Amino acid sequence: MKEDRVVSLEALEARMKAYAVRVDAALSRELKLYAHSRFHDPLVYAIEGGKRVRPVMLMLSAEALGCKDDSVLGAAVAVELLHTESIIHDDVIDEEKVRRSKLPFHVKYGYSASLLSADFVFAMILAIAARYDDRRIAEEVSNAALQMSEGEYSELTIDPQIYKLTWDEYLRIVADKTASLFETSAKLGGLLAAGDEKEVQALAEYGRCIGIAYQLKDDLLDWRSHDKVSVGLLKTHGESEVVGKMKAQAESFAEEAKRQLMHLPRNEATILLEDLSDFTVLREF
């Protein structure tokens, strides 16, 4: 990556803030529809914090193709809610004790409430998808949820103490459990902006590559957390080899994401998507 393209965390966040603010406002409006529900306050807690990377990516993908209006906000909320649902489930499975410097949902509200709340969130997502005439919106969100579940289940069934995980298996799990929602987010932006097939597929591949790079970087930053897939790789290959290969592949996927953007018009939104590619592997949080 060229040094003159590297952007600081502060600079990138400042440029993304206007998009994140719109997402937060849309999330608040959506939750107000359920103000009467017992799930309302817990879900407000669940969505607090976060960078809104996936919905912002959706909005930028649409804007890159000329769509700047609020028609994309429903889909943006849907992908953020799907991310929220996955966090609730993941924290239960992983028995997390902290999330975004606060108590994980299941610690604050209990395991049973966590399962029911995640179900409720998925029902909210279905309601949002039903508002779009284009059935592809629902199909893409559904595909992402299916892939995420497949990836999580694959990871759940691994015993790193006895199973030697291959690189291809590791990347397949990463692609399913994490990259699928990034891919869907970028692809939905292209679909909502009425992009042609080449543009939509370029955005989908951009999102997939960013998602893989993002998870690789996460695993590097949290290397000693004894994550199942990380430990499985360590058992097979050794720490120095695994860390070196993760760094190299994260950079490679981020570069491939930027190459996909060459199929899109060059504008402010595309440039921000490009900077997001660099930041994905350079971040330290």
Image: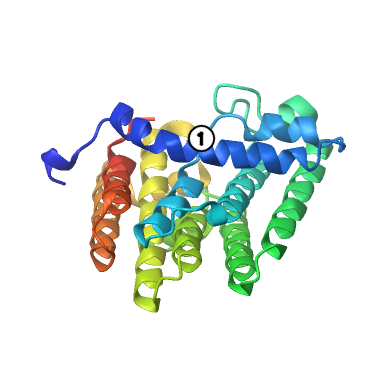
Given the image, on which type of amino acid does mark 1 rest? Val
Place residue 16 in its image quadrant.
Answer: top left
From the top left corner, tell me how far across and down residue 271 is, in percent: 26, 49
Q: Residue furthest front?
A: 69
Side of 1 relative to 39 (left or right): left
Residue 8: x, y in percent? 26, 30
Query: Which residue lies at the image location 54% right of the left edge and 51% below the top edge?
Result: 70
Residue identifier under label 1: 21
Q: Residue at x 73, y 47 (%)?
A: 121
User: Residue 116 at x, y = what percent?
Assistant: 82, 44
* Between 184 and 65, the one nearer to me in the picture: 65
Is residue 165 visible in the rendered image? The answer is: no
119 vs 107, nearest the viewer? 119
Work out whether 46 lies above or below 263: above
Numbered disc 1: secondary structure? helix
- Which residue occupies 40% across, 50% down? 233
The percent position of residue 137, horizontal first and vertical second, equals 59, 67
Which quadrant of the figure has residue 132?
bottom right
Viewer-proximal residue among 146 and 229: 146
Q: Is residue 140 left or right of residue 1?
A: right
